[in-house]
Image (cartoon, grey):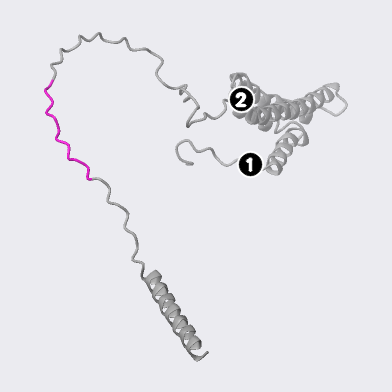
């Protein structure tokens, strides 16, 4: 119903406590008439044969006790004995159910006995790979192999193409430098002419 490997949804703690109180009180509050209810619940939880026998035996014991109480007069001490037996049977069924149910839920919360939790394997560079516990443990015996004679294969030389020498680095064209040089020449010619004109005028 829940698929392969899927666990059924767990009950909440409130539901568990409510069912526990309801089943435990069924035997005692009905004066032992429904003592078989908590005892059968214990048999379902444990699955032991003696729990089933105890549940089935409680039914005729409760019926016989009620027959004795109803058929004999009230002053007969056997009625008191039958009523005490039925009430003790109901109390025993309730206590037995509570102990078994609490133990069952406690065992479900604990890990399996003898189980040692393993840390997760660290995989990656520098960490060894952990072996799976389910891997096959038998060892295979190696089969001896005779080495095959190897004949050397002739290798043809691969012609190597010469690597051309690197080209000398190209200098950028000095366009700006030539322009500045030309302007400086013009300026110096202008200054010479000016000086020459001033000398003539003196």
Q: Which mark is residue 184?
A: none
Could you tell me residue 116's position as x and y percent? Answer: 59, 22
Could you tell me residue 21's position as x and y percent? Answer: 74, 38
Q: Which mark is residue 46?
A: 2
- Dividing the picture into quadrants, the one containing residue 74 is top right
Q: At 75% across and 27% down in the image, what residue appears?
A: 95
Give the vertical position of 171 relative to 194 (above or below).
Answer: above
Is residue 146 rendered to the left or right of residue 111?
Answer: left
Instruction: Say what secondary structure mark 2 lies in.
Output: helix
Give the vertical position of 15 relative to 136 (above or below).
Answer: below
The mark nearer the N terminus, 1 or 2, is: 1
Look at the image and say whether residue 174 sits in the magenta stretch: no
Q: Which mark is residue 11?
A: 1
Is residue 145 rendered to the left or right of residue 109?
Answer: left
Q: Which residue range is magenta in the image?
A: 153-164
Could you tell me residue 172's position as x and y percent? Answer: 34, 63
- Marks 1 and 2 close (CB-CB < 8 Å): no
Q: Camera-side residue: 126 or 42?
A: 126
Look at the image and say whether residue 162 sits in the magenta stretch: yes
């Amino acid at each position: 119903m829940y698929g392969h490997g899927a666990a059924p949804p767990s009950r909440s703690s409130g539901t568990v406590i409510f069912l526990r109180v309801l089943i435990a009180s069924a035997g005692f509050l009905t004066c032992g008439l429904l003592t078989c209810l908590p005892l059968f619940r214990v048999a379902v939880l444990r699955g032991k044969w003696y729990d089933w026998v105890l549940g089935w035996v409680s039914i005729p014991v409760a019926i016989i006790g009620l027959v004795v109480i109803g058929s004999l007069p009230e002053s007969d001490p056997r009625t008191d004995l039958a009523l005490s037996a039925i009430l003790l049977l109901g109390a025993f069924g309730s206590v037995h159910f509570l102990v078994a149910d609490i133990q069952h839920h406690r065992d479900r919360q604990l890990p399996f006995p003898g189980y040692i939790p393993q840390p997760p394997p660290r995989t990656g560079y520098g960490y060894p790979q952990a072996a799976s516990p389910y891997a096959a443990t038998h060892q295979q015996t190696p089969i001896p192999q005779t080495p095959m004679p190897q004949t050397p294969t002739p290798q043809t030389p691969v012609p190597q193409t010469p690597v051309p020498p690197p080209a000398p680095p190209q200098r950028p064209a000095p366009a700006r430098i030539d322009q500045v040089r030309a302007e400086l020449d013009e300026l110096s010619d202008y200054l010479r002419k000016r000086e020459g004109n001033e000398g003539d005028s003196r």
